[in-house]
Amino acid sequence: MSKIQNIGVLTSGGDAPGMNAAIRAVVRGSLYYKLKVTGILRGYDGLINADFMPMDGKSVANIIQRGGTILKTARCDDFRTVEGRAKAYQNLVDNGIDALVVIGGDGTFTGADIFSQEYDFPIIGLPGTIDNDLEGTDLTIGYDTAINTVVNAVDKIRDTAESHDRLFIVEVMGRDSGLIALRSGIGVGAEAILIPEAKTTVSDLVYRIEHGRKDKASKIIVVAEGDEAGGAYNVGETLKKKFPHHDIRVSVLGHIQRGGKPSCMDRVLASRLGVAAVEGLLEGKSKVMVGQINKEIVFTPFAKAIKHIDAAQITPGWLRLAEILSL
Ligand code: F6P
């Protein structure tokens, strides 16, 4: 029999579409097992400041379709300190919370890992980030929605590019990871994709433009924000100097990629993982992230989950595909 009676749930780091569906699943999953649930506001900030609210079935009604997070989120510096984590632990004890579900990305799990080592406190993580850069799950909650947002936006840009015979450089999110750029780049038929994990240089781009098919009316180059070329504006400046007669424009998609209604895939993934997190805690699991690999539920230690996906293995295949398809 598990001793857990009251599960705290929080969202932390950058918001991602599907976080609300995940909160709903954690709450309803806990109620199903007759547990109490406490919502913690603004991630680890709320843990340190005891910003708690009891949650019931109704408190998560009508949120599965909403973007953002009803619990709000933050990137919390205080939780990086020993004092901050001590306050957080005391607040959990004082409020009778005996386990945590944290929904976020690598920063969230790094904090959770340190905290659960220090206090031997049961914690399970749910992968909520648009970046899809965690080990231990095929997809993170929010990634599917984000790449569809990018595809919808770039399809519109393509209309203008095609009508004006323009080259567009489109910057997508991904400070440390090019996975949004890779998949959305394939999805929009990009002529080239620049990502931090691959050393495609602007000179490679120039070569491709010079030697590419001459009858192309439009060209789209997708750049991940973390690419070493320094973002879409820098790439644009270099290309404008090299090709003064080309009509070149830059578009930075920014935070539209984090918002909006979650896709059905993200809602279903969040729902499944949310209930699995509660069941994992009841089975005594801790210090792990719950993910889905090949349709199966998998628990991966935080320390392994936060190691970024081995991009060296996956990117050459995707980039080769993009190159073949852009001929
Ligand atoms: O981690 C998600 C993410 O959207 C990254 O892709 C991006 O680099 C970062 O968050 C932006 O963070 P902020 O909203 O704090 O500027």
Image (tube, helix red, strand yellow):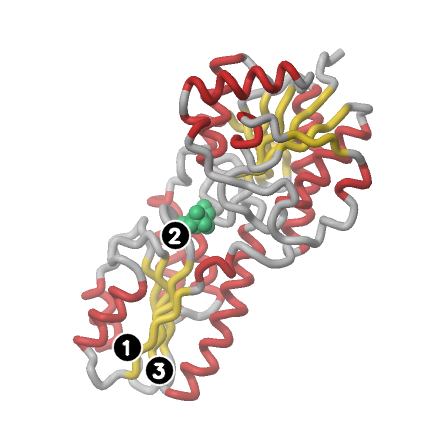
Q: Are marks 2 and 1 in contact (CB under 8 Å)?
A: no
Instruction: Say if 287 sits above or below 309 in the image.
Output: above
> Can the viewer see residue 327 in this picture?
no
Residue receiving disc 1: 212
Residue receiving disc 2: 178
**Secondary structure state at the residue bearing disc 2:** loop
Q: Which of disc 2 and disc 3 is earlier in sequence?
A: 3
Q: Position of residue 55 (x, y in %)?
A: 75, 33
Between 87 and 308, the one lying in front of the other is 87
Query: In 3D space, how far apart are the residues under numbered discs 2 and 1 (Cα atoms)?
Result: 24 Å
Residue receiving disc 3: 166
Query: In 3D space, how far apart are the residues under numbered discs 3 and 2 (Cα atoms)?
Result: 24 Å
Left or right of 38 in this view: 248: left
The quadrant in which residue 280 appears is: top right
Left or right of 45 in this view: 283: right
Q: Which image quarter holds the C terminus?
A: bottom left
Instruction: Say if 324 sits above or below 69 in the image.
Output: below
Instruction: Mark 1: give few (<14), some (14-19) or many (20+) Cα within 10 Å.
Output: few
The amino acid on which the numbered mark 2 sits, given as a three-letter code, is Gly
Q: Residue at x 77, y 40 (%)?
A: 59
> Can the viewer see residue 117 in this picture?
yes
The amino acid on which the numbered mark 3 sits, given as a three-letter code, is Arg
Instruction: Say if 200 sits above or below 137 in the image.
Output: below
